[in-house]
Every structure is written in structure tokens, then in C-alpha cells.
Amino acid sequence: MQVTVNGETCETQAVFVAELVREHVATQARVAVVLNDAVLPAAACAATRLAEGDRIELLTFAGGG
Amino acid sequence: MQHDDPLLLGGRAFASRLLIGTGKFADANVMIRAVQAAGAQLVTVALRRFDRDRPHDNMVEPLLALKNVTLMPNTSGARTAAEAVRAAHIARDLCGSLFIKVEIHPNPHHLLPDAIETYEAARILARDGFVVMPYIPADPVLARRLEEAGCASVMPLGSAIGSGQGLATSELLRLIIRDARIPVIVDAGLRSPAQAAAAMEMGCAAVLVNTAIAIAGDPPAMAGAFAQAVQAGRTAFHAGIMAAGSEASATSPLTAFLHPQGGPVPANQSNRRLPNIEPQNHEINLA
């Protein structure tokens, strides 16, 4: 199905959000997930199904003042 | 003095009164060495989209590996209270810290805080149990309102972010400090350790420095210099700083043993610009 990850449209075979996250984040980096403008707790990613057209933001920390 | 004088925030005691921002550093390694050199215990980080092309550009893990460092994520990038509140919750989920620097500046040209959105976000986050540290304009009325809303501190700007213009708001900062019952932390605009010391001498509880350290030729050395200046300023504040006067006040006795007849001041001293008068000496000469 087609979803939008960090503003870019992409095709995915993932069924659950956690699978999509693993497709995009290969490292052990801490990543927060925002699904359609709502924060999705890490514990909920494995059980949350993706739907066509979902918008997912994967966020992490960067330098900032 | 420093050991008995901790910075109290959110029920925690911090020995360091120099907070460090992590933007603009050449790389994470230099940033970590600067944080260590400063002995900083509160360090800000920002949220951004995960970049799969730079997966190892990770600021947080090396910071969390440092003992005594507490992360204070900021809400930079938020333009409304709702966005800032959401960013705060995301940041808390990511790092587990309740400290949040509320930062809402909609205009990239001056980066001045939106007082209305900042107040609203701070009020909500304080209610939600965060340790709220809002970046604000140097407005004593707003500072008081934020204190009443439950903020742990207020962080008024010295001057615009990254401008290096120092304590342009110093008279307003004095008013904020005079009335505040929570720590006042000057954030933004400090260019040099001297300016940090001046802020601390005024009675600021702490300062937050980023650009001046990050873009220095030797960031760890500059971080150390800022830490020394902050300590010096704090110690001076407690020690009691003398009032400035308009006239000289001699530090050496001006007894007239070199000219016992009470004659005129030698020519080679007559061009002194400051009046060199001590009352006692004056009376002797008159006698």
C-alpha cells in the first residue's frame, strides 16, 4: 500500500507500524512515531495496523539550542 | 560556595549553572567534549525528522552516556501552542526527561518568541507534569504570569538567538529577577564569558549558551571559559558587589609625610584626572 513517511510518498509491504519503522530505521536509534498527527507510543507500534494513505512522521533528536 | 548553592529545578539540584545548547557544533564528538569541559548538567536538544541517510548522526546516546547530564529537549520548530505541546510529549517519550524548553518563534528573521502561544503551551505542559522552561521575551509581566502558571523557571532572552549582542535587555532582566521566585535563566545572545559573568552578577540563576561555544575556534576551551565566568559571576553576586560612585575613593593613606609643610601638590601629580581627596587629609591641610 501507499503511505507517506516524513513527507515522502512510498510503497510498503508492512502491515503494522512497527514493520514500517524497521524498514526505514535500520539502526537502534531512538525514533518517535507520529501517525496521522497523533503520537503513537512505542509499545503500540507493533499492534497498530497501517492503512492506505497513512501519514507517518519518524522523529529523532538533533542538535539544538 | 558553588557546592552549597545548587540550581534547583523540578525538584532536582544542579551544581552547574551553565546550560548548553547542542546546535551548530561541527560534530557530536566536539559537542560532547564541550559539555564535559563545561561540566554542564542540563543540555538542550531538538526534535527533527529521522534522516535515513544519516542514521549514525545521533546526538542523544552519547549525551545520555555522560553521567550527570539531564536532557532538556526544546520545542523548536513549533509555531503554535498545540504543536509545542505535541513536541514536548514526543520528546518525553523519546528520552524520558520531563524537562522541556518551550520555544515558539514563528519568524525566522528574528526568532523572537511568540509570547501568547508560549504562555498557552507552558500552562498546559505545567499542568501535565512537565518541568517547563519557557524561552520568552524579557517581559516582567509575562514572566510573572508564567511563574503563576507553574513554570519551573523563565528563560528571557539577552538578545536575539545567535546574534551575540549580549545583554541588550539588561534593565528588563533586572525587573524580572527582582520579582521572580523561580530561577531566571538568561537564554540567547551571549557572545562572551564576560557577558555570562555580567548576567550572573545581576542575579540570574543560570545562563544557557549555544552559538558562542559551538562556533568558537576551540569549543571545549570556550565552554570551560564560560563555566569559569558563570561561577565567578555567581560568587560575586553572593559576595555583594560595591555600588559605583562618581568620585574616587583612595585605597592608600594620603597622609602628607612627603610634603609636611602642606605645600602644593607636586607638578608631576597635578595632571591627575581624578580628584584625589580624602577628608582626613583635607582637614590637616586646612589646619
Image (cartoon, grey):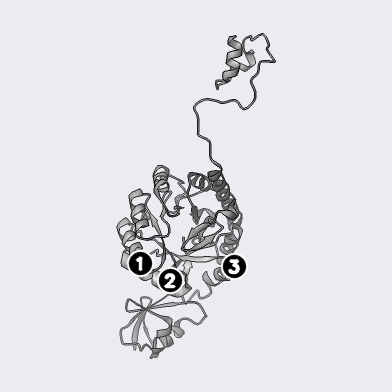
Q: Residues within 10 Å of mark 2 (few under 14, many from 20)?
A: many
Residue B127: mark in rendering: 1
Marks 3 and 2 sit apart, C-alpha to C-alpha, by 20 Å
Residue designated by label 3: B67
Nearest to N terminus: mark 3 or mark 2: 3
B250 versus B28 height, above or below: above
| Residue type (three-letter) at the residue carrying disc 2 | Ala
Residue designated by label 2: B91
Q: Nearer the viewer, residue A30 or B55?
A: A30
Marks 1 and 3 sit apart, C-alpha to C-alpha, by 29 Å
Q: Residues within 10 Å of mark 1 (few under 14, many from 20)?
A: some
Q: Are marks 1 and 3 in contact (CB under 8 Å)?
A: no
Quadrant (top left, top right, bottom left, bottom right) of the C terminus of chain B: top right
Q: Nearer the viewer, residue B142 or B164?
A: B142
Q: Are marks 2 and 1 on the same chain?
A: yes
Residue B215: mark in rendering: none
| Residue type (three-letter) at the residue carrying disc 3 | Lys
